[in-house]
C-alpha cells in the first residue's frame, strides 16, 4: 500500500480547491487538509464549481483520492458553551454543506473547551450539537481531534472521546483524528505507539480512526501545551514519528503534517517558508535531515 502523506495547505478564494491541489503536488504529497477560510473567523466565500472540477481533474491525473482529503473546521466553533451554541451549530452545519459541495467526506473538529462550565455539562452540549448537525443526508464524517488538554480542552483522553461517540446517534458519521503532538502533550507515550493504538482500540475502536496529524512537539510528554515542532526537531523525535507514519495498522489512513513554517533567518520572527516539501522528502527517504531548516531557507530565498 502506498504511503498517504500530505500537509495543511491554503485554500484561497480565487483558486479554491485547485490551489490546494497545486500546492500539494509542489510538496510531492498525495493528500492534503485545508480550512475553507481563515481558521479564526467565519468569513467564507462562495465555492466556484468550475474551479473545483478542474481540481478533480488534476487530482485524477496525479492519483490523489478525494476520499483522503480533509477539511478542518475553524477553532471558533465551541459547542460546549451555551452562549456560543447556536452560532457553533449553524456554522458547523454550513461547514458540512461546504464539504458536501466539494465532495469531501472528512471534517476534523476540535471537540471544544468547557471554560467555566461543569465538565459533564459541557460534554453533553457537544453531544447535543453533534447530533443536530449530523442529522442530514450528507456523506460527511466529523472526526473529533484528540487534544493536548491545554486549558479546559475536551478530548485529552480517549475515554472522553469515547463518551462523546457513545452518545452519537449517527455512528457512521463520527470518527477520530489522532494528533501526535496533542497526544504526547496529553500524556500518551509515543515511544510505544503500538501500545497507544492498543489503548485506542480497546477504548474507542480502531475502526473510528480516520485521520492522523503528524507533528513533533516542542514540549515534553503530559505538558498540556500544544505547540507543534518540525519533524525530528522536537521531543517525540524523528525515529518515533517514522515508526508511526509507517505503522501497518494505520497505513490506510491519511497522514497530515501541521508543522510550523520556517523563519527567513535566526533573527527574524515571521514564519514565511513552508517546511512540507522537505519534511515529506525526509519522511520518504526514511533518513533524518539535520540540515532541514537551512535547506528550506536556501530553497525558498
Ligand atoms: Fe486541529
Ligand atoms: Fe492537529
Ligand atoms: Zn495542535
Image (cartoon, rainbow, N blue to C red):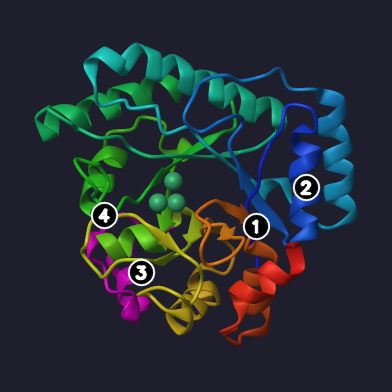
**Mark-to-mark CA distance, 2 and 3:** 31 Å
**Mark-to-mark CA distance, 1 and 3:** 33 Å
Foreground residue, 124 or 51? 51
How many other residues sit within 10 Å of disc 3, few (<14), some (14-19) or many (≥20)? some
Residue 267 lies, in percent from the top left, at 51, 63
How many other residues sit within 10 Å of disc 1, few (<14), some (14-19) or many (≥20)? some
Indicate yes or no whether the magenta region holds residue 202.
yes
Q: Which residue is mark 3?
A: 197
Q: Nearer the viewer, mark 1 or mark 3?
A: 1
- Where residue 150 is drawn, which disc sits there? none
Residue 222 lies, in percent from the top left, at 21, 64
The residue range painted magenta reads: 186-206
Which residue extends farthest left?
118
Disc 1 vs disc 4: Cβ atoms closer than 8 Å? Answer: no
Q: Which residue is mark 1?
A: 273
Q: Which residue is mark 4?
A: 158
Indicate yes or no whether the magenta region holds residue 266.
no
**Label 3 residue near ligand 2, CB within 8 Å:** no
Q: Secondary structure at mark 3?
A: helix
Residue 259 lies, in percent from the top left, at 51, 60
Foreground residue, 79 or 257? 257
Q: Nearer the viewer, mark 1 or mark 4?
A: 1
How many other residues sit within 10 Å of disc 2, few (<14), some (14-19) or many (≥20)? many
**Label 4 residue near ligand 2, CB within 8 Å:** no
Q: Nearer the viewer, mark 4 or mark 2?
A: 2
Disc 2 vs disc 3: Cβ atoms closer than 8 Å? Answer: no
**Label 2 residue near ligand 2, CB within 8 Å:** no
Name the image quarter holding residue 3.
bottom right
- Where residue 21 is drawn, which disc sits there? 2
Among the two numbered marks 1 and 2 on one chain, the one whose residue lies closer to the N terminus? 2
* Vertical comparison of 4 with 117: above or below: below
Q: Secondary structure at mark 2?
A: helix
Amino acid at each position: 500500500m502506498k504511503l498517504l502523506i500530505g500537509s495543511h495547505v491554503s485554500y484561497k478564494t480565487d483558486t479554491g480547491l485547485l490551489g490546494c491541489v497545486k500546492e500539494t503536488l509542489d510538496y510531492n504529497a498525495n493528500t492534503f487538509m485545508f480550512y475553507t477560510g481563515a481558521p479564526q473567523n467565519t468569513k467564507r466565500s462562495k465555492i466556484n464549481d468550475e474551479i473545483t472540477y478542474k481540481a478533480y481533474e488534476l487530482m485524477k491525473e496525479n492519483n490523489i483520492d478525494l476520499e483522503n482529503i480533509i477539511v478542518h473546521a475553524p477553532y471558533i466553533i465551541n459547542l460546549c458553551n451555551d452562549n456560543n451554541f447556536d452560532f457553533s451549530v449553524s456554522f458547523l452545519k454550513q461547514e458540512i454543506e461546504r464539504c458536501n459541495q466539494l465532495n469531501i467526506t472528512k471534517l476534523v473538529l476540535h471537540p471544544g473547551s468547557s471554560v467555566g462550565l461543569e465538565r459533564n455539562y459541557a460534554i453533553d452540549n457537544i453531544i447535543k450539537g453533534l447530533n443536530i448537525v449530523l442529522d442530514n443526508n450528507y456523506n460527511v464524517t466529523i472526526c473529533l481531534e484528540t487534544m493536548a488538554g491545554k486549558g479546559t480542552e475536551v478530548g485529552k483522553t480517549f475515554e472522553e472521546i469515547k463518551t462523546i461517540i457513545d452518545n452519537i446517534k449517527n455512528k457512521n458519521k463520527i470518527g477520530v483524528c489522532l494528533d501526535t503532538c496533542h497526544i504526547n502533550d496529553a500524556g500518551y507515550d509515543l515511544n510505544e505507539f503500538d501500545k497507544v493504538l492498543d489503548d485506542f482500540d480497546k477504548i474507542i475502536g480502531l475502526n473510528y480512526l480516520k485521520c492522523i496529524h503528524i507533528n513533533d512537539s516542542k514540549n515534553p510528554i503530559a505538558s498540556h501545551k500544544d505547540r507543534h515542532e518540525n519533524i525530528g526537531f522536537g521531543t517525540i523525535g524523528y525515529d518515533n514519528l517514522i515508526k508511526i507514519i509507517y505503522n501497518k495498522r494505520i497505513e490506510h489512513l491519511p497522514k497530515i503534517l501541521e508543522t510550523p513554517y520556517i523563519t527567513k533567518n535566526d533573527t527574524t520572527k515571521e514564519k514565511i517558508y513552508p517546511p512540507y516539501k522537505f519534511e515529506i522528502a525526509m519522511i520518504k527517504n526514511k533518513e533524518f535531515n539535520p540540515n532541514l531548516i537551512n535547506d528550506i531557507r536556501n530553497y525558498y530565498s
